[in-house]
Amino acid sequence: MIDGLLGDLYDYESLLSGDERKELLGIRRFLDEEVRPRVNESWESATFPMDLVPRFAEEGMVGRSYDLEHRPRASRLFTGFISLEASRVDPSMATFLGVHNGLSMGSIVLLGSDEQRARWVPDMVALQKIGAFALTEPHGGSDVAQGLETTCRRDGDEWVIDGAKRWIGNGTFADVVIVFARDVADDQVKTLVVEKDTPGFTATKMEGKYALRTVQNADIVFEDCRVPAENKLAEGNSFRDVNRVLKLTRGGVAWNAVGCQMGAFEAAIAYAKERVQFGRPIAGFQLIQDLLARMAGNVTASLGMAVRVSQLQEDGVFRDEQAALAKAFVTGRARETVALARELFGGNGILLENDVVRYFADAEALYSYEGTREINSLIVGRALTGVSAFV
C-alpha cells in the first residue's frame, strides 16, 4: 500500500483538504489490502465478490456526491479521487460503484421527488439496495435517444413496460433498476424504477465478455411489466432529463479512466525495476524509460483534465461539451497508456498474474461506454461550431 500516488507527478492530491487526504488514505488502504487480492480471481471467473459490497459502504465510498440528512456531500474533487482509487485497483469495481453511485442513485437524486429520494436513497447509500441503469438496448446504442424501442404506457395506477435492454451493469443482482422507456401517449422518454422480482422483468447474465469481466452485465426483457405509478420519477419526462444524469457521470468515467491507466503505469514501473535482461534491470534501458515517460505524460494530462472537470462541477458551470471532451480524451489516453504498459511487459504482459492485461482489456470498455469517442466528439464539435453533425 502506498501513501501517495506514484502516477500523480504534479501532486494534484495536495488540492484536497487535510481531512479529505486522511480519509482517502484509508480508502486506498482498504482497496489495496482487501480488494486487490480478490481482483484477478473474480475477473477470470467473471463473478462478483458480493461479500465485499457492504465494505464499500462502510469505507464511505457510496453516496458521497449527494447531500444527505446525516452527511453533507463531499467535494467533487474528493469523489473524483475515490473513483480514481477504485479504478487504479480494479476498473470493474469502479464500474460497479459508478453504475450504483452515479447512474442509478444519481437518477433518483436528480429526477426524483422528495418522497422518492426518501424511499430509495438511504438504502442505496448503505448498499442494502444495489442500483442499475437500463438505457442501452439490443438495437440502440449511440442512437438510443431517437431509436429507443422500449415502451411504457399508463394503465390506471400503474405503468406497463414492454421491450428489452442490453449491457446493463449490475443488472443480474440489482434491487433497483432505473428504466427509460418511450411513452406511447406522447412519444417522450419516461424514467421509471423497477424493483427486483417485479413480474414481467427478466435479467440474464451476458456471457463471453472480455472486458470488465467482474461486472455483471445483463440482457433484460420486459413483458407486460407493471410498476406502481409512484415509481415514475417525478422529473424524468424526456430524454433531456436523461442527459442531466449522463452529463454528471461522464466526468466520473474520466476519473475511472485515469485510475485504469495509473494502475497499468504503476505495474509497469514495478516490473521495469525487477525484470532483468542482458544482466541488468530493464528500467535502465533508454527505450523502456521512453515508454514510461510517455505513459507519465498521458496520466498527468488526463488527471489534470479530470481535476478541472471536478472544479467546474463544484462551481456549477460544467457544460455538456466539457463532459464530452473529458470522457473522449481521457479514455483515449487510457487506451494508449495500457497498450504501452503491455508492450513494456513483453510476453509476460498477457499473463493475468501481472495485472496489465486486465487494465488493457478493461480500457476498451471504458473507451466505449457512456458515449463513444465519436459521439462525444460530435457534442464537442457542435459546441465549437454551432452546427450539429449527428445525422
Image: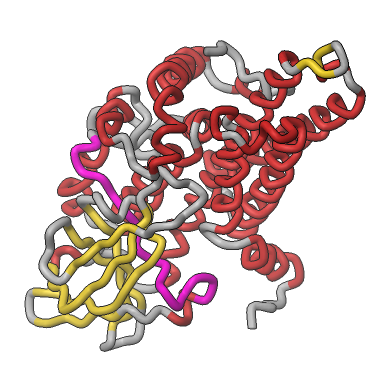
Quarter where residue 220 is shown: bottom left
Is the residue 247 above or below the residue 150 in the image?
above
What span is in magenta? Answer: 127-143
Hey, which residue is sitting farthest left in the picture? 157
Instruction: Tally the marks.
Output: 0
Residue visible at 64% across and 59% down in the picture:
321
Task: Say which of 245 and 113 sits in front.
Answer: 245
| Magenta stretch secondary structure, dominant | loop
**If the image is split into quadrants, where does the C terminus sit?**
bottom right
Is the residue 118 above or below the residue 112 in the image?
above
Task: Say which of 348 and 69 sits in front.
Answer: 348
Q: Is residue 228 visible?
A: no
Q: Is residue 387 visible?
A: yes
Residue 338: horizontal and vertical position, in percent?
68, 39
Residue visible at 80% across and 14% down in the picture:
281
Residue visible at 28% across and 87% down in the picture:
184
* Left or right: residue 101 compared with residue 139: left
Quarter where residue 125 is shown: top left
Is the residue 143 above or below the residue 347 in the image?
below
39 within the magenta span:
no
Hey, which residue is sitting farthest bottom in the picture? 185
Residue visible at 87% across and 17% down in the picture:
278
132 within the magenta span:
yes
Residue 40: horizontal and vertical position, in percent?
46, 32
* Left or right: residue 292 compared with residue 285: left
* Left or right: residue 251 compared with residue 347: left
Quarter where residue 128 is shown: top left
Residue 370: horizontal and vertical position, in percent?
52, 58
Residue 200: horizontal and vertical position, in percent?
15, 71
